[in-house]
Image: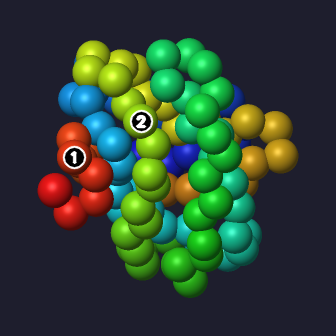
Amino acid sequence: MDIYQNGDSLTLNNCPAAKAITVRFAKGSEGDGVLSLYINGSHAKNVAFRNTGAWDKYKEMDIVIDIPKGADVMFVQDPGDLSTNIDYVDFYENGLGN
């Protein structure tokens, strides 16, 4: 999902409970940047995404965050954030690697 201008978002509804997530993403020529992460409509944290060198070159990043069962999780490009292409998100109920 390309998130490339202010207001663009990726919304995941009715998510499983998790202590961590893994995000597969690509970032092109803009350099490193941030997307805002919301849980149930509340800003949870800013997530820094490193440049991957091309829009079709993907990397994975782990994020430790408490997500309640049934939550709506949203990555949003807020003003000042930079474009990111998110391929998928994995949820880990017992933390990373579990």
Name the one closer to the observer, 82 or 49: 49
Residue 23, percent from left and from top: 38, 56
Q: Is residue 44 above or below residue 90?
A: above
Q: Amino acid at mark 2?
A: Asp
Answer with mark 1 or mark 2, whichever residue precedes in sequence.
2
Q: Residue at x 41, y 36 (%)?
A: 66
Q: Residue at x 59, y 63 (%)?
A: 49
Residue 26, percent from left and from top: 48, 67
Residue 83 can be seen, yes or no = no
- Please identify the quarter of the rendering in which residue 59 is found: bottom left
Q: Residue at x 60, y 20 (%)?
A: 42
Q: Is residue 67 above or below residue 57?
A: above
Q: Tell me how the rendering is colored.
A: rainbow
What residue does disc 1 label? Answer: 94
What residue does disc 2 label? Answer: 66
The outermost residue toward the bottom is 53
Name the one closer to the observer, 7 or 74: 74
The outermost residue toward the left is 98
Secondary structure, mark 2, is strand
Secondary structure, mark 1, is loop
Label 2 neighbour load within 10 Å: few <14, some 14-19, many 20+: some
Q: Amino acid at mark 1?
A: Asn
Residue 32, percent from left and from top: 69, 70
Q: Is residue 87 above or below residue 44?
A: below
Residue 36, percent from left and from top: 64, 40
